[in-house]
């Protein structure tokens, strides 16, 4: 028996972002721990919460908010940074980026110039040709 798990692209994007934020927080804490010796108990004391609250946030067992990210960064002596960028278009079949190249070749014929456009999708191996005639 096989199961197919369908995840809405919107939810997948949100979950991946949250995962990246958690990973960045854990990395910052590990870096800070190696430099200053800070631990979850010291972070919790600085924020006025129980150590288990910090543990749940970092493990992913509780919802992490923008405020809690800012407060954790403050307790670490770090400053959070947020960047948005356009996402790469992905092929729906396997999530790999679609790489499409377009080439133009011109050829002279007795009736005039002909432009041939060749579009290749390297992910799927598809190739499409367009012919444009000019007089």
Image: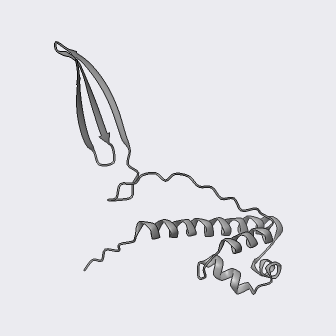
Image position of 39 with respect to 20: above or below: below
Q: Quadrant of residue 79?
A: bottom right
Q: Which residue is pictured at 61% across the width and 82% down the height? A: 62
126 sits left or right of 10 in the view = left
Task: Measuring from the top left, give residue 58's x and y in whole percent.
Answer: 64, 76
Q: Which residue is pictured at 16% across the width and 12% down the height? A: 110
Location of the N terminus (image quadrant) = bottom left
Task: Measuring from the top left, give residue 118's x and y in whole percent.
Answer: 28, 33
Image position of 73 with respect to 95: above or below: below
Location of the C terminus (image quadrant) = top left
How was the colour assigned to the protein in this rendering? one colour
Task: Measuring from the top left, give residue 123's x and y in whole percent.
Answer: 33, 48
Image position of 105 with respect to 7: above or below: above
Image position of 129 with respect to 53: above or below: above
Task: Measuring from the top left, give residue 109's x and y in whole percent.
Answer: 19, 15
Q: Quadrant of residue 131?
A: top left
Q: Which residue is pictured at 56% across the width and 52% down the height? A: 85
Q: Quadrant of residue 37?
A: bottom right
107 sits left or right of 57 in the view = left
Q: Which residue is pictured at 80% across the width and 72% down the height? A: 75
25 sits left or right of 9 in the view = right
């Amino acid at each position: 028996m096989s199961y197919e798990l369908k995840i809405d692209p919107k939810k997948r994007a949100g979950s991946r972002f949250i995962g990246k934020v958690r990973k960045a927080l854990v990395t910052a804490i590990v870096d800070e721990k190696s430099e200053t010796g800070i631990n979850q108990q010291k972070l919790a004391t600085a924020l006025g919460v129980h150590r288990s609250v910090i543990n749940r946030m970092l493990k992913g067992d509780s919802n992490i908010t923008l405020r809690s990210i800012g407060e954790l960064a403050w307790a670490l002596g770090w400053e959070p940074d947020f960047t948005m960028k356009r996402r790469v278009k992905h092929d729906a079949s396997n999530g790999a980026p679609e790489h499409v190249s377009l080439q133009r070749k011109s050829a002279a014929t007795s009736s005039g110039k002909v432009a041939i456009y060749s579009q290749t999708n390297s992910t799927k191996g598809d190739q499409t040709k367009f012919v444009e005639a000019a007089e």
